[in-house]
Amino acid sequence: MCGIFGIVSRVQFTDSGNLLLGVTNKLFKLSESRGKEAAGLSIRDKSTIYVLKEPLRASKFIASRGYREVFQKISVSNKDTAENDTHPILIIGHSRLVTHGQSGLNNNNQPVIKRGVVGVHNGVIVNDTVLWDNFPEMQREYQVDTEVILSLVNYYRGQGNSLVRTIQKTYAQIEGTASIALQFDDTDILLLATNTGSLYICEDLKRDMLIFASERKILKQLLNSRLLKKRFDSSAITQVKPYTGLIVELNSLNRNSFSLNMDETTPEENYTSLSEKTDIRRCFNLTEPVATPNRSKYIISDETKKIMNATWEYLYKDPDTIKRCKRCLLPHTMPYITFDKGGVCNYCRDYGREDHLVLGEAELMKFVEKYRKNDGSPDVLIGFSGGRDSTFALEYIKNTLKMNPLTFIYDWGMVTDLARRNQARVCGKLGIEQIIVSADIKQKRGFIRKNLNAWLKKPDLGLVPILMAGDKEFYHYFHKIRKENGIKLFIFCGGYEGEESTGAFKLGFCGVDRGYTSATYRMTGISIINKIKLIAYYMKNYLTNPAYFNSSILDTLFAYYSSYVLPDDYLYFYKYIAWDENTIVSTIKENFNWEVEKDTIATWRTDDGTAALYNYIYMTMAGFTEFDTIRSFQIREGKLSREEAYNLIKEENKPRFSSLEWYAEAVDFDVNTAIDIINAAPKLYQQSALLNPSRRRLVVPTRKEL
C-alpha cells in the first residue's frame, strides 16, 4: 500500500542527468499520494547500486542533502566514461505508507536490500510470520513484510531455479497483495511482477527510456508534463496485468512477460549473468526510532476496565434497566422516539415493508450492463474498506456480474491493521488493483487528538461525529478517481438500510429530526433546512467551546462539504442484493480467510479505528450504540427475533479494550483520563429510578470503592 516507480534510461547520464533528476522528482511528488511516512530510491549505474532511504515524506526527501549527493555520485562516476562505453541507468523509487515495521528504523523503509537483491514492494503480505516459520533456512533481519519476498527469491534461486520459476514459486507462497520491482547484483535486468495489476509502464518514442509506476494516472500526469510531453506518447501506457511478471533487459529495453501461474509455460531467459557482481552501496543511516514514549497512558488500567465493565453490566443486568420498544430494541434515550400505549416505538409503527423491498439481481444486471466495457479495462469503481459488506460485494461484482472493478481506499489514519490485511487478502486473490490515497497520517491523527481534547472539555453526544470528520474526504476522492480513470459507475458497497438507520440518532443528537420516513435515507439526502440546523448546532457548540477552533477546522469544513454537498450519484449494492449477515460472513471467511477482530464478536465496524471509542461513548452516555439501531432494523425486517437481537447487542456493546488502546496510541492521548471523563459525563437516563438519587449518577463503583 505504497507508491513504487522506476526509470530505465539507455541515454548517457552526462547527457540526461538533469532530465532523470527532474523525472524522478516528479514521480516522487506524484507517488506521495499513496504514502507519506517514508521515501527511498536506488540508482544503478555501470558498477554500483546506490540505495538511499529516509523516514521523510517524498517531497522532503527529494529536498534532502543525501538525495542530491546520490545523484552527484552518479554524475561523477559517469564523467570518465568513454563516449562509446554506454551503459543504462536504473532508478527505482518508493513512497511509503507504513503497514509493517516502524519507519523510524531505516531498514524497514524501502528499497529493501537482501543478499544481492534490491527491491521495492507495494502491498501487504498477510502470512509473512507463517512463512518465516515455514522456511527456517531464511534469516529475518527486519520488521517489514517486503523482506520475506526477497528472502523467498533468494531461497528459490539458490535451489537452481530460473528467475521466472523463482518468482512463480515466490508468489505461490505469499498471501496478500504484492506489486514488486527487483534488481539483482549479478545481472542487468529489472524484474516487475504483480498479482493485482498495480503496475503501469510506458516506453519513449526512441526506445531509449522506460518508466513504470503504481497507477496509470501517475504515468499519464508525468508524460503530459513539460519534461516528457514530446518524448512519450501518453496513450501508449500499458498495464502489467494481474498475475503477470515482466523482465526488462537494461541494455536493450527488451521485455519478456510471463505468467505467475506455475502451470503455464515459462519463456526462455536469454539474459546473461555479470562476470563481476555489482556493488550495493548503502547511502543511509540505520536511523534509530524515536525514543519510545511511556506507553502506560495508552494501556487501560485494571481499575478503569472494572468501571467500564460495571457500566456495561448495569445496562444489561436487567432487560428493563433501559426502557426499550416492546417490538424492537430502541431505547427511550433515542432522539425523537415516542411509544404508544403498548410500548411500541414510532420507528416500528411507521415501518412499511413495501418501502424497503430489494430490487433484485436481475435489475442490477440490467442497470450495470450499459457501463460494461469489453476491452478488459475497469468499468466500475468500488470503495473498498476491507469490511464485511464491501468484501462480499466486491467478489459478487467481480465473479457474478463479471465486471472489471477498480478499488480504492482513502487511508486517513484510522484504517485498522486488520482492515489492511483483509484488503490485501481479497485484492490479491481476486487480482484487483487497489488505488491507495493516503492522507498525511501524522497530521490527520493530530486533528483527531485536538478535536477529542476539545470534546472532552465539554462532552456532547451531538459532537461525537467530529472525531470521524477526517474520513469524509473519501467522497471527494471517489469523484476524483472516477474522473481520472474514465469510469462512470461507482458502486457503494456499504449502505445497507439497517446501517444507514444509525444516522438518525447521530443527527437527532444535533437537534435534527429526519422522521422515520427518511431515517434510512443516505446522509447526502437530508433537506436543506436540516443541513442548516446541523451547521447551526455545530457553530453554537464551537462558540461555547473555543477549543474546537484549532488547526483541524478546515478539515472539518471540508468533511461537511464532502458529506452533504457533493452529488450522490452512486449505485447502492444492497438496494439490489439482499443483505444477509450470515451469508455474507460465512462466504468471505470461506473464500478469503477473512479475519475478525479478537476483542469483540462483532464483524461490523472492525475496519474503523474510531468505532471502539465512539460506541463506548454512546453506550455510556445514551445507553445504546449503533448496534441497537441496526439490530432493531433487522427485527422489523423479520431477520432476527427480539430475543436474538438483544443477546447480540449485549455482547456487541461490551467495551473493546485492545481496540481502544490501539486508538489511544495512534491518536496519542491518555486513555484512562478520557474514559474517566466519559464515565462522569451526564447520562440521558439520569432521571430513571435506577439512579442513586443522592449521587445523580449510575451506581457503579468508583476507583476509591475498587
Image (tube, grey):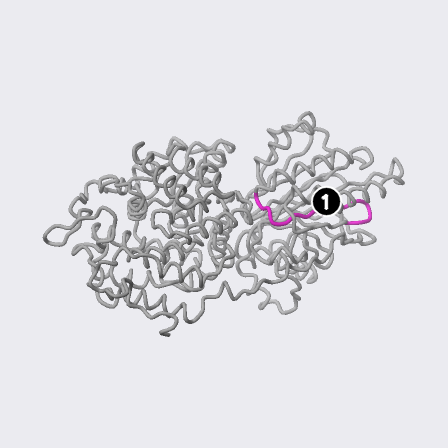
Would residue 532 be found to the left or right of residue 207 on screen? left
In front of the other: 154 or 146: 146
Q: Residue at x 60, y 32 (%)?
A: 220
Q: Residue at x 53, y 61 (%)?
A: 127
Report x, y in % for residue 673: 44, 62
Magenta residues (range): 34-49
**Rendered position, 65 above or below 216:** below
Name the quarter where the C terminus is drawn. bottom left
Q: Residue at x 50, y 54 (%)?
A: 667
**Rendered position, 291 above or below 97:** below
Would residue 646 be found to the left or right of residue 680 on screen? left
In front of the other: 291 or 227: 291
In front of the other: 638 or 305: 305
Residue at the top extreme of this rendering: 230
**Within the image, what quadrant is residue 363 found in?**
top left
Residue at the disc numbered 1: 64
Would residue 162 be found to the left or right of residue 619 on screen? right
Q: Amino acid at mark 1?
A: Ser
Report x, y in % for residue 576: 30, 41
Residue at the left extreme of this rendering: 341
Which type of secondary structure does the marked residue at label 1 adopt?
loop
Mark 1 burial class by Cα count in 10 Å: few <14, some 14-19, many 20+: few
* Residue 39 lies within the magenta run: yes
